[in-house]
Image (cartoon, coloured by chain):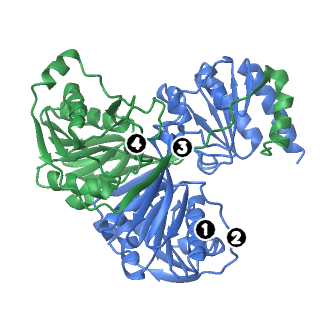
């Protein structure tokens, strides 16, 4: 089984963000980067599927600058077999521009499955997976939390609001991963050493035209600072009063 | 003057609230750009057309009803082909979908089929000249990105709750449509939909969300959270990732960066310390109440009203007082 996993290098979301001088990007001072949350789950899913199948290959692919090679190496350290960097100075915000580059690379690659995280935690568009699928001409299932592959077909489960649905589809296909197949494994020391010797191919990204762009970014308005109104059950009547008269939600 | 398109999401033969929001948003956009018509697309099993009137009240001038026995459940390829077909022929300026599980799956398929880009998960929008300008919470809600989308139609998904449902008191015309792809020919097929309780209010729709965390100590104690939610009468129950990972609650109820993002009028956090991953899913709630034994818990930095103490004493008392307050209405 041949699986591609498309991953993205994103800022560590636990850090405090500041706005950069141009007003269109984060201030890069102090930022740390890592693989996007759901993309880690996608790498884990790819590795588990190949392990369960007994043979195959996991190829990790990213669109991004040279610094994104660090993210590819991390996935190689987890156990992926080889990596492809589609080189671009910046990752366009427009999901279709990125999907065009990925589909161009993956279309004739003979992949049984192309996996994505359900969305990148930075741009949060959730569009690249299904758009890549369409451009490749293969079926797509998004945001799955369970996945079984057997006999050239897939069965997946998706979480809806207050429900879940079971989806069946033929391979080859694009599948985007929510949680559910298992927490991403940490690269072992041995894995990290092996990753340094695994092939990492660099090619120019054939990006599509971008018609979705960023005008500006801002920090969200501050909430008023938190307020502790009391201790223990005796504070409940005061809470009820505030909910009724101040917040007007009761 | 421009016509707008809205996708009316339904499940199990009923409209979802986000359907009315998409239509209301399209109505606002139409009125703000000098008038025109709102056309809503409603797809489902035979009988779904009965829901057209509600879409009219939310602001639709025309409802395109596509009924087919093979479309009782969401069918991504058929829905996408049918929406794309209509958008291709209609000369629409904008196309509104919900940023729901279904809308987020559907809209990118439609956009790429039309050869256009799209904007996601907008909390606000305006058409300016030949562009759509929108507000999009990114970076787990820690950044608000103002995006600009050019090209026509401008496809977008709207964050649930971002738009108030309007009562336009309109009577929509109804047009019968047909699926643009035979449902039997679809490659991707939804074979079943399992609910987690029909009577429950969905997290996205509920004006009040009561969530529980590890502070509850064990799964059985979640009944305290459920009883509090029941006392409000209009509340849904959420949970933290720690709790859903441990199997105390269904994963679909997880609120946070890797789960659901909610923005209710009132969010009550019970026994939740306030990890960044959780705050990402609820920080835009209008009013936040926190009950936790640790006065230094990060949730108290965000909570409008915090009570420090033993939740096993505080929550039952709160449930009782909320019940009384509601009874007094």
Q: For mark 1, name the chain.
A: B
Residue A239 placement, left or right of B248:
right
Cα distance, mark 2 to mark 4?
36 Å
Task: Please give the residue where the numbered disc 1 appears in the rendered image.
Answer: B24
Q: For mark 4, name the chain.
A: A
- B295 or B218: which is nearer to us? B295
CB atoms of marks 4 and 3 within 8 Å: no
Chain the render paints green? A
- The hue of chain B in the figure is blue
Same chain shared by disc 1 and disc 3: yes
Task: Please give the residue where the numbered disc 2 appears in the rendered image.
Answer: B167
Kind of element beneath mark 2: loop
Same chain shared by disc 1 and disc 2: yes
Percent of width and height locating residue A82: 13, 35
Task: Please give the residue where the numbered disc 3 appears in the rendered image.
Answer: B261
Which residue is pictured at 53% across the width and 37% down the height?
Answer: B280
Cα distance, mark 1 to mark 2?
8 Å
Regarding residue B44, the answer to whether it shows in the image is: no
Kind of element beneath mark 3: loop
Task: Please give the residue where the numbered disc 4 appears in the rendered image.
Answer: A122
Percent of width and height locating residue B309: 74, 18
> Of the residues tagged 4 and 3, which is closer to the observer?
4
Q: For mark 3, name the chain.
A: B
Within-10-Å neighbours for mark 1: few <14, some 14–19, many 20+: many
Cα distance, mark 3 to mark 2?
26 Å
Within-10-Å neighbours for mark 3: few <14, some 14–19, many 20+: many
Cα distance, mark 4 to mark 3?
15 Å
> Of the residues tagged 1 and 4, which is closer to the observer?
4
């Amino acid at each position: 089984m041949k699986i591609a996993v498309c991953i993205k290098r994103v800022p560590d979301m636990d850090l405090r963000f500041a706005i950069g001088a141009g007003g269109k990007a984060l201030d890069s001072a102090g930022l740390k980067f890592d693989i996007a949350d759901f993309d880690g789950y996608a790498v884990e899913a790819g590795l588990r599927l190949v392990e369960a199948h007994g043979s195959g290959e996991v190829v990790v692919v990213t669109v991004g600058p040279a610094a994104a090679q660090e993210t590819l190496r991390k996935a190689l350290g987890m156990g992926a077999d080889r990596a492809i960097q589609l080189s671009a100075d910046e990752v366009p915000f427009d999901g279709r521009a990125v999907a065009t580059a990925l589909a161009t690379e993956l279309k004739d690659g003979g992949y049984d499955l192309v996996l994505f995280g359900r969305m990148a935690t930075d741009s949060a568009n959730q569009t690249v997976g299904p758009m890549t699928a369409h451009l490749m001409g293969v079926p797509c299932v998004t945001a799955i939390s369970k996945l079984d592959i057997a006999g050239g077909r897939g069965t997946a489960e998706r979480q809806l609001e207050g429900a879940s649905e079971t989806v069946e589809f033929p391979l080859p296909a694009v599948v985007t991963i929510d949680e559910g197949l298992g927490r991403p494994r940490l690269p072992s020391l041995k894995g990290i050493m092996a990753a340094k010797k695994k092939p990492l191919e660099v090619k120019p990204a054939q990006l599509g035209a971008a018609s979705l762009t960023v005008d500006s970014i801002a920090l969200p308005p501050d909430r008023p600072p938190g307020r502790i109104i009391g201790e223990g059950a005796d504070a409940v009547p005061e809470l009820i009063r505030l909910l009724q008269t101040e917040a007007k939600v009761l | 003057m421009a016509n707008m398109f809205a996708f009316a999401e339904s499940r199990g033969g009923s409209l979802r609230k986000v359907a009315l929001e998409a239509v209301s948003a399209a109505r606002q956009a139409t009125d703000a750009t000098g008038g025109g018509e709102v056309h809503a697309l409603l797809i489902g099993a035979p009988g779904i057309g009965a829901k057209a009137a509600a879409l009219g009240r939310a602001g639709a001038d025309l409802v395109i009803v596509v009924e087919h026995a093979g479309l009782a459940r969401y069918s991504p390829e058929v829905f996408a082909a049918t929406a794309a077909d209509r958008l291709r022929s209609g000369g629409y300026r904008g196309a509104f979908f919900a940023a729901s599980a279904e809308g987020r799956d559907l809209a990118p398929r439609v956009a790429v089929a039309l050869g256009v880009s799209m904007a996601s998960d907008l909390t606000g929008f305006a058409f300016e000249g030949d562009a759509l300008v929108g507000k999009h919470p990114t970076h787990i809600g820690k950044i608000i990105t103002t995006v600009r989308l050019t090209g026509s139609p401008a496809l977008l998904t709207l964050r649930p709750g971002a738009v108030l449902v309007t009562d336009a008191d309109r009577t929509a015309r109804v047009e019968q449509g047909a699926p643009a792809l035979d449902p039997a020919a679809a490659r991707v097929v939804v074979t079943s939909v399992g609910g987690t309780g029909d009577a429950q209010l969905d997290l996205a729709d509920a004006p009040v969300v009561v969530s529980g965390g590890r502070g509850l100590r064990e799964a059985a104690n979640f009944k305290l959270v459920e009883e509090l939610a029941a006392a409000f009468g209009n509340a849904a129950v959420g949970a933290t990732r720690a709790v859903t990972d441990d199997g105390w609650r269904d994963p679909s109820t997880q609120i946070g960066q890797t789960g659901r993002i909610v923005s209710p009028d009132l969010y009550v956090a019970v026994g939740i310390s306030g990890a960044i991953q959780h705050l990402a899913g609820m920080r835009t709630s209008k009013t936040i109440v926190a009950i936790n034994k640790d006065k230094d818990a990060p949730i108290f930095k965000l909570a409008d009203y915090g009570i420090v103490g033993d939740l096993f004493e505080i929550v039952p008392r709160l449930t009782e007082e909320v019940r009384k307050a509601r009874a007094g209405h």
